[in-house]
Image: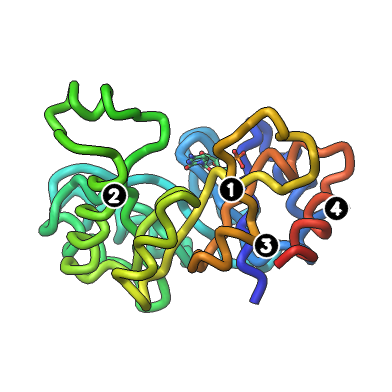
Amino acid sequence: MNPIYLALDLPRLDAALALAQKVKSHVGGLKLGLEFFCAHGHHGVHEVAKLGLPLFLDLKLHDIPNTVAAAMQAIHVLEPAIVTVHAAGGRAMMEDAKAAAGEHCKVVGVTVLTSLDGADLTATGIGGSAHDQVLRLADLAAEAGLDGIVCSGHEVGDVHRRWKDGYLVVPGLRPDDGHHADQKRTVTPSAARRAGASVLVIGRPISRADDPVSAARAIEGTL
Ligand code: C5P
C-alpha cells in the first residue's frame, strides 16, 4: 500500500479537491488538518471522501477525556482512517479517545510539535531534550492503547526500535531533489520509510510543485 498521505493544506475547497483529484493515483490517502476542518467542516470532509481515498483527520485533539471522547464520536460518521490527539493530554484522555474511535480508525498521538525547541519546552516546564520527550510520550501512548504516534523523521528510528508494531506517522519530509540543499536537517521520504515510518505526510513538495502529479510520482518511485 502507498504510505504517502497528501496534506491538503489549501484554503479553498475547490482547489484542494482539484489537487487531490489530480494526484490521487500516486498517494495512499489524504490528510485534512485543523485549518481545513474549521473552514469547511463535515461538508468539506464529505466532498474529499468522494474521491475514495482513506482520510486522515489531523485535528490534534487535546482536552479533558470526556470532551475528547465526545469529539471522537462526533467525527465517527466521517469514517476517518486516522485521527490525531495530543499525547500530552495524558493517559486517560488517550484511552477514552481510542475507546470512542471507530473500529477501523487508527488513533495516533502527537508527541512534540517540531515548532517547539528545547527552550520552548523548558518554558512550559518540560526538562530534558525534545527527543527524550518524544520517547516518553511514545511510551505513554503505547500504554494507553493508541495505535501509534506522530514524530519527525529524526526520531522515527528510535521510536520504531522501542515500539515495533507502532503505527508511526512522519511529517516534515523533503525529497532529495536538489531544492532543499540549504536545509541540513531534512529527512527524505525513503529514509523515513526505511527507519520504520508507516505513514509519510507530504504537503508542499507536492502541492506547490509546478507539476504536482510528477512530483507525487517521483516521490512514490523512491519508496
Ligand atoms: O511541510 P509540508 O507541507 O510537507 O507539511 C505537511 C503537513 O505536515 C502539514 O499539514 C503540516 O501541518 C504537517 N507538519 C507537521 N509537523 C512538521 C511539519 C509539517 O505536522 N514538522
SS for dot 3: loop
Query: What's the coloring here?
Result: rainbow
Of the two numbered discs 3 and 1 on the same chain, state the one appearing first in sequence.
3
SS for dot 2: helix
Of marks 4 and 2, the one in the foreground = 2
Q: Position of residue 137 (x, y in %)?
A: 22, 53
Label 4 crowd bin: few (<14), some (14–19), many (20+), radius 10 Å: some
- Residue under label 3: 50
Instruction: State left or right for residue 65 relative to residue 28.
Output: left
- Whether 178 is drawn above or below 214: the answer is above
- Residue 24 occupies which quadrant of the picture? bottom right
Of marks 3 and 1, the one in the foreground = 1
Q: CA distance from mark 4 to mark 3?
A: 19 Å
SS for dot 4: helix
- Residue under label 1: 187
- Residue 105 occupies which quadrant of the picture? bottom left
Of the two numbered discs 4 and 3 on the same chain, state the one appearing first in sequence.
3
The residue that appears at 15% across and 34% down in the rendered structure is 126
Tag 4: amino acid: Val
Picture quadrant of ligand 1: top right
Of marks 4 and 3, the one in the foreground = 4
Query: Which numbered disc covers residue 134?
Result: 2
Of marks 2 and 3, the one in the foreground = 2
Of the two numbered discs 4 and 1 on the same chain, state the one appearing first in sequence.
1
Q: CA distance from mark 3 to mark 1?
A: 32 Å
The residue that appears at 75% across and 57% down in the rendered structure is 219
Label 1 crowd bin: few (<14), some (14–19), many (20+), radius 10 Å: some
For label 4, being within 8 Å of ligand 1 is answered no
Of the two numbered discs 2 and 1 on the same chain, state the one appearing first in sequence.
2
